[in-house]
Image (cartoon, grey):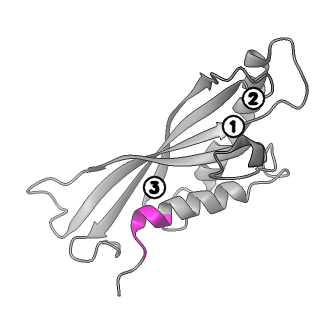
Amino acid sequence: MPGTPFLTLIEEKMYELIAGMSIGDYHFDWGTVNQEDYAKAVFPSALIYYEPEESLDEPDGAWGQAYFNQVIFRVEVVAKLEEEYENPVFEINKELNKALDDLKKLFGKNWSLDGATDTIMYVGSERKEEALGDIFIPKRLITRWLCRYEQDRTSPDIASC
């Protein structure tokens, strides 16, 4: 019987780790993960999206019996201001910066996601202003994380080492 696909393992571990962050070790008690409806979300929240996967295989390379892959996961962070500010588009940056530090620390301490991936690395981030004009949620943070993993060619749910 086939096992759990690597991409599922990576996504589930990211979900579990983000949902488990709390004040004491991190800036925030993180709220919901993968809840796109702001009315149902607890902030800060994270949305995990998959971007296209790439193979790093070479025709005559060392990976003849395995696939060597990399994938970028986009983690979008939504934070909320607790009070009204004169300039909320810039005030939210303070909260988004804290959220970015939380994610960097989280994945820095859990660099293999408990074996779900060979490594997870920070690629970059950007802030995106929300089109809705919400003064409490004026902007979101979009972060990108590169994961590399190996899998057996004939049993892709098995790591190949």
Nearer the N terminus, badge 2 or badge 3?
A: 3
Residue at 71% across, 38% down: 99
Estimate how packed mark 3 is, as few (under 14), some (14 to 19) or many (20 or more) residues with alpha carbons within 10 Å.
some
The percent position of residue 5, horizontal first and vertical second, equals 39, 70
| Marker count (numbered) | 3
Report the span colored magenta.
Answer: 4-9
The percent position of residue 161, horizontal first and vertical second, equals 31, 71
The percent position of residue 75, horizontal first and vertical second, equals 56, 43
Residue type (three-letter) at the residue carrying disc 1: Val
Estimate how packed mark 1 is, as few (under 14), some (14 to 19) or many (20 or more) residues with alpha carbons within 10 Å.
many
The residue to which callout 2 is attached is 137
Residue 101 sits in quarter: top right
Cβ–Cβ below 8 Å for labels 1 and 2?
A: yes
Q: Nearer the viewer, residue 40 or 10?
A: 40
The residue to which callout 1 is attached is 78
| Marks 2 and 3, how far apart at CA | 32 Å
Q: Nearer the viewer, residue 134 or 158?
A: 134
Estimate how packed mark 2 is, as few (under 14), some (14 to 19) or many (20 or more) residues with alpha carbons within 10 Å.
many
